Amino acid sequence: MDLAQAPHFLVTKLAVLSDAAASATLRNDELNTEIAALRDRYNGRVVRAGDHPEKLRIDIQQRLEEQKALQRQRPIEADILGRCRAWLAALPPDTMLEQIIPDAEAGLSLSDVRARIKKLRNQVEALKRVPVPASDIKQKVRTYVERLPMPSIGGIAAGEALTVQWPTGLHALLAFVEPNVLAERLLAAIDEIANTPCPLPEREQQIAELECEIDRLQRTEEAIVVATGAPRERGCPPPVVLGVKAVEARGIRAA
């Protein structure tokens, strides 16, 4: 996507993200200078009227904490900015971007929103972990049953004593006596696994609904971050951070 053709609100958002990253770098340099100067005064290398050791120690600690938080957040913001640019660059040239204004829920804190998102993500992951049987699952089961060990029979010639060595395990015995029953029972167990907690069509619908709610909450989270200046978390989706949704244009599905 050509950013020269991007909507004004999108260009503005990218500029804000870029300025924030640059400001963080400048602030980090300022903190290095301030901390070094305060340490010189605290250790007596530089003397200034009115200096108090305890006050200097507190000032140094506060700046070190700010620097630690800044250094933790800078790579996250840089990664988000880079992924936003990469996402936009990968969009087809004629992709249309719709601005999304997030809904705000009164009294909802950032921690509340993030807790909800985490809970919904766990639900999605649990649903996605339910296996979907392969199209050839019946053949796989029958092949498994056919390959189970069979009894080893000897002494069938004239004058020999008949010997039968049975494989261990009831499943092998059942495969020898009733292979079709064993295969059917295995397929029934597989079907139960694949349809718990619900059949695949319902599961797909639940996943779609949960992911839609996650997207909504993530946009609310971004709105709170912008309003309060709270730090973003790693992995924020570019469309959420940019406040947009890619829509189809001229029959081409947007990325």
Image (spheres, helix red, strand yellow):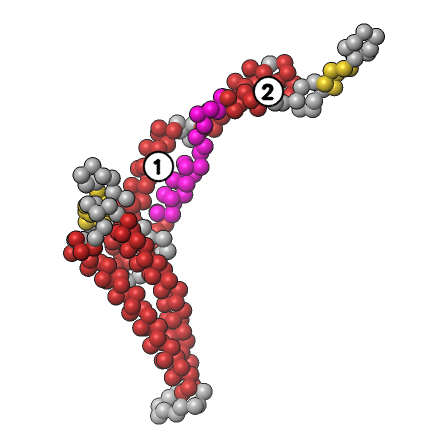
Marks 1 and 2, how far apart in space? 37 Å
Q: Secondary structure at mark 1?
A: helix
Q: Residues within 10 Å of mark 1 (few under 14, many from 20)?
A: many
Viewer can see residue 108: no
Q: Position of residue 42 (x, y in %)?
A: 43, 86
Residue in the picture at 43% in, 27% down? 195
x, y percentage for residue 140?
52, 24
Residue 246 occupies quadrant:
top left
Residue occupying the point 34% across, 34% down: 206
Give SS at disc 2. helix
**Along the line of sight, which residue is nearer the eye, 97 or 199?**
97
User: Image point 32% across, 41% down: which residue?
Assistant: 211
Which residue is identified by label 1?
A: 207
Task: Based on the picture, tell me whether residue 134 belongs to the magenta stretch.
Answer: yes
Answer yes or no: is residue 199 visible. yes
- Are the two marked residues, 1 and 2, in contact with CB atoms closer than 8 angstroms? no
Q: Which residue has dot 2 on it?
A: 146
Determine crowd level at label 2: few under 14, some 14-19, many 20+ residues with C-alpha closer than 10 A.
Answer: some
Please state which of residues 251 and 142 is positioned toward the viewer in this rendering: 251
The residue positioned farthest toward the top in the image shown? 158
Task: Tell me the kind of residue under disc 2.
Answer: Glu
Residue 170 to residue 232: above or below: above
Q: Which amino acid type is shown beneath numbered disc 1?
A: Ile
Residue 231, by quadrant, is bottom left
Image coordinates for residue 39, horizontal then vertical, percent:
42, 83
Q: Is residue 19 left or right of residue 121?
A: left
- Between discs 1 and 2, the one toward the N terminus: 2
Q: Is residue 224 magenta?
A: no
Give the magenta-colored segment's residue range.
Answer: 117-138
